[in-house]
Amino acid sequence: MYTQETKIYTVILIMIITIVIIIIYYVYSIIKTHKLEIHNRKMYLLREINIIEAERERIAHNLHDSAGPELSLIKMKLDSISSVDLKEGVILEDTKSDIDLILTNLRQFSHNLMPVALKAQGLVSALYELCEKQSKSPLRIEFVAREEYKMPDETAIHLYRIVEEVIHNAIKHAQATLLKIQVDLIDNRLQIIAKDNGIGFDYNKSKPVTNGLGLKGYEYRTELLGGTYSIYSEKGKGVEVVITIPIQSPNEPI
């Protein structure tokens, strides 16, 4: 009898263990499939964004290398015209002034699409240039970085767009007079810390609203790059954004 009961208990135990193993394997398969789907979706979205950035770069080059010089040539031709009466002379000068304004706007538009310094000199140089241009009353921007950091072009572009959006939010929403941005490399992870002295907000209560004010944009890019994102804020105490991104040398496999 004892042997028979032992056999029954053994069979039951084996069945339980088998069921547990099947359940564990099933759960593991679901989690693995879900993670793979998330990874594939991120990679797809990252490729889509990279395609958009590449198109922006192409348009910027066309504006800089084609439309700009052609407008400059037209202005030179207008400069060569001298035999006009007073009324025509006024129209001519107004036309040249209009062309100068178009050229200025064209250069700015081209720069916004793809900053020249980003590809020519690197991320830090481009960010210095960006902060210098955006630092104007009432917001002063202080940018600090110890050196230029090597990274894939795609990563540099995303980080540039992230800082762009941080500055945009500080200008549009923070009512700040000072924005400090610091970039540093810590153990192959690039850290960006941006802190303003603006009005701040209750982040926990305002999160659904602030997501619509641009915060979701650089949080989204940060996640796509495999980084982490934190925001700290209280009413009357400004906003601090901390973004950490793993970076690799352009010579290393990505």
Image (cartoon, helix red, strand yellow):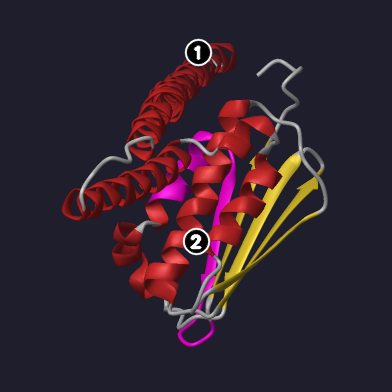
Residue toward you, 135 or 80:
80
Between the C-alphas of marks 1 and 2, the distance is 67 Å
Disc 1: CA contacts within 10 A as few (<14), some (14-19) or many (>=20): few
Secondary structure found at label 1: helix
Q: Which mark is residue 11?
A: 1
On screen, residue 178 above or below 167: below
Q: Which residue is mark 2?
A: 167
Secondary structure found at label 2: helix
Q: Quadrant of residue 151?
A: top right
Residue 129 forms part of the magenta stretch:
no
On screen, residue 144 above or below 40: below
Residue 233 forms part of the magenta stretch:
yes
Query: In the image, residue 208 lies at what x, y percent?
Result: 31, 63
Q: Is residue 101 left or right of residue 110?
A: left
Residue toward you, 18 or 116:
116
Which residue range is magenta in the image? Answer: 217-237
Q: Does any portion of residue 204 appear in the rendered image? A: no
